[in-house]
Structure formats: C-alpha cells, structure tokens
Image: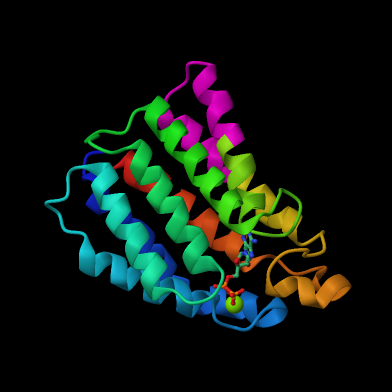
C-alpha cells in the first residue's frame, strides 16, 4: 500500500461521500433515510483526525473508529466504529499491510460487528457483504495468490452479497420492522461495506 493508511482512509471517505445520496436513497426504502448522511458525516470526522503523517496503521484505524463511534448516530456508527477499532488492535504498530495481517484485521472487524450487533449472516445487514468477502479473500490468500487478486475476489463476493440482501427479509436493525416489505430492497449497510472494500482494493493497487 504505497500511499499508506491515510490514502486508504481517504479513498474510503471519498467513495462514501460520492455515494452519500445513493446510500440515503437505499435507506429511504427500508429504513429512515439517513445511512448516507451518517456515513458521510462519520468519514468527514475521520478525515479531520487522520493525517498523511499517520504511518502506524493500527493507530490510524483506532482514530478512525473513535471518530465513527462519536460522530455517527444510528446503528451503523457503533458497528463500523467497532470494526475499525478491532481491526486497529490487530494492526497496532504495523506500517505495512500483508496478506496475513489484513486477513486477521478483517476477521477481527467481523467479530467486533457481531459482538456489538448480535447479527448473523442472512439477516440482511452489512455482514452479508463482509463475511463472504473475507471468506473469498482468505481462500485466495490460502492458495498462495497475491493480495490484489484476493481483494478482487473479496469485492466480487461482497457484490454478490449485496444482491443476495435483495432476496431476504431483514431480521436486525430498523429494516426488520418492515418484515416481508423489506424484500426486494438492497441493504444500505451491505452497500456501504461493498464500497469500503472497493476503496481498500483500489488503494492497495495504486
Ligand atoms: P439506522 O438503522 O440506525 O438508521 P444506518 O441507517 O446508518 O442506521 O445503518 C443501517 C444499516 O446498519 C443497515 O443497512 C444494516 O446493514 C446495518 N445494521 C443494522 N443493524 C445491524 C446489526 N445488528 N448488525 C450488523 N449490521 C446492522
Ligand atoms: Mg438509517
């Protein structure tokens, strides 16, 4: 990752901000129309905290997690905040991403989201993008293939996961109040998770 963690977080912030209206539109259908607003607010707080001088990946992710926890209302703030904090713990003191430490960070992020939100795969949440993505990533790495290829596989799996959320009923979060009426709609959090993974993929490539 040539541009470092600052570059990576900037890439995520940019993608989320560019898609703010789209994410909010998705949340209008099955939630309360704030997911894009929440995420854009959170990432503007993240970009106020991190600087190009941040080279310790773990420390930067911790700052990002704290910014998300404190600035994002709604379910997604604490969940993404915890994900970044937990990934940051795994990467504390690291200045380079490797196939293995990135895998460990992804797994810690998932564990954090699940500990906080008590959701499983198949409940129409961000986990339906992230869990299959990390599984796909891990398979490619286990086969001895490089990180860029693994991130491509992760993004494809996350994209499929987002599509899958259209076919299932929400059983966690606000969308669960809709029951069957949540069918046919893609989950906003799964969509922002896909965007995050795509941003990580792109920042690794550069
Ligand atoms: P809120 O639902 O409080 O308005 P947001 O709109 O910002 O918060 O975020 C909604 C997204 O949060 C959902 O699309 C879903 O992906 C995710 N989410 C909600 N509850 C959970 C949970 N328990 N575990 C994982 N993700 C969840
Ligand atoms: Mg919402």
Single out the residue that lies furthest toward the top: 144
Q: Start and end of the magenta stretch?
A: 135-156
Residue 106: % across, % down: 48, 40
Q: Residue at x 32, y 51 (%)?
A: 61
Count of numbered badges drawn on the protein:
0
Which of the 4 image quadrants contains residue 123?
A: bottom right
Q: Which residue is at the far left? A: 53
- In the rendered structure, the answer to whether residue 31 lies left or right of residue 63 reads right
The quadrant of the picture occupied by the N terminus is top left
Quarter of the image where one finds residue 178: bottom right
Residue 173, placed above or below residue 190: below
Q: Is residue 4 above or below residue 162?
A: above
Residue at 75%, 53% in the rendered image? 164
Whole-percent x, y for residue 33 in the image? 60, 83
Q: Is residue 125 left or right of residue 39?
A: right
Q: For the point 52% across and 60% down, which residue is it?
A: 79
Residue 199 is at least partly visible in this image: no
Whether the magenta-drawn stretch holds residue 190 is answered as no
Residue 147 appears left or right of 67 = right
């Amino acid at each position: 990752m040539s541009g470092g963690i600052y570059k990576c977080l900037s890439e995520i912030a940019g993608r989320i901000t560019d898609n703010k209206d789209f994410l909010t539109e998705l949340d209008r259908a099955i939630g309360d129309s704030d997911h894009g607003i929440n995420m854009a607010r959170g990432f503007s707080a993240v970009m106020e905290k991190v600087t190009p001088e941040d080279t310790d990946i773990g420390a930067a992710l911790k700052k990002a997690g704290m910014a998300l926890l404190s600035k994002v209302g709604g379910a997604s703030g604490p969940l993404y905040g915890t994900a970044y904090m937990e990934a940051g713990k795994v990467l504390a003191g690291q200045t380079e991403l490797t196939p293995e430490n990135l895998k460990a960070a992804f797994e810690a992020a998932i564990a954090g989201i699940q500990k906080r939100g008590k959701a499983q795969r198949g409940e129409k949440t961000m986990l339906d993008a992230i869990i299959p993505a990390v599984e796909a990533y891990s398979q490619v790495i286990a086969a001895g293939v490089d990180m860029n290829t693994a991130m491509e596989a992760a993004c494809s799996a996350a994209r499929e996961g987002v599509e899958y959320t259209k076919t299932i009923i929400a059983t966690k979060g606000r969308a669960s109040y809709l029951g069957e009426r949540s069918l046919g709609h893609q989950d906003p959090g799964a969509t922002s998770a896909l965007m995050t993974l795509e941003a990580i993929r792109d920042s690794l490539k550069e």
